[in-house]
Amino acid sequence: MQLLSAQEAMGGAGGIIIWVVILVVFMFVFMIRPQRKEQQRKNDMMSKMAVGDTVCTTGGFYGTIIDIQDDLVIVEFGNNKNCRIPMQRAAIAQIEKAEDAVEEK
């Protein structure tokens, strides 16, 4: 049976520490950073939301914003002007600005 010297024992522990650091950097670059960028993009989109914009909800419905309150957005769906549904801001997946829709026509 052979006893390890202190330097050999530290070499093994140092190698494990290096792999842990590499794993943490990998997780940050490929998981946490893209998630933060997506959250920032969504926050920017929500802050630029205005009355008259066309939105797509997380359920896949398209409608037009007719009123915005704190965390509540009232969206009008379809040609029927009586179909107005209040929903949370978080339920909006995409926004198409009213100015962009006018320019395309």
Image: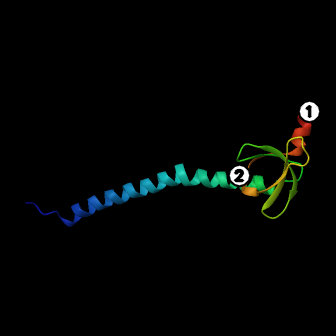
Horizontal and vertical percent position of residue 28: 52, 54
Q: Where is residue 16 in the image (x, y as percent from the top left)?
A: 33, 58
Residue type at mark 2 is Arg
Assess disc 2: are there few (<14), some (14-19) or many (≥20) residues with their C-alpha within 10 Å of its C-alpha. few
Depth order, front residue of 4/84? 84
Q: Mark 2 points at which residue?
A: 41
Residue extending farthest to the left is 1
In terms of image quadrants, where is residue 14? bottom left
Q: Give the colour scheme of this rendering.
A: rainbow
Disc number placed over residue 105 in the picture, else none: 1
Q: Residue 47 carries which label?
A: none
- Asked whether, in this view, residue 75 is left or right of residue 14, the answer is right
Give the image quarter of residue 9.
Answer: bottom left
Q: Which amino acid does label 1 sit on?
A: Lys
* Label 1 SS: loop
**What residue is at 72 percent from the left and 43 percent from the top?**
60
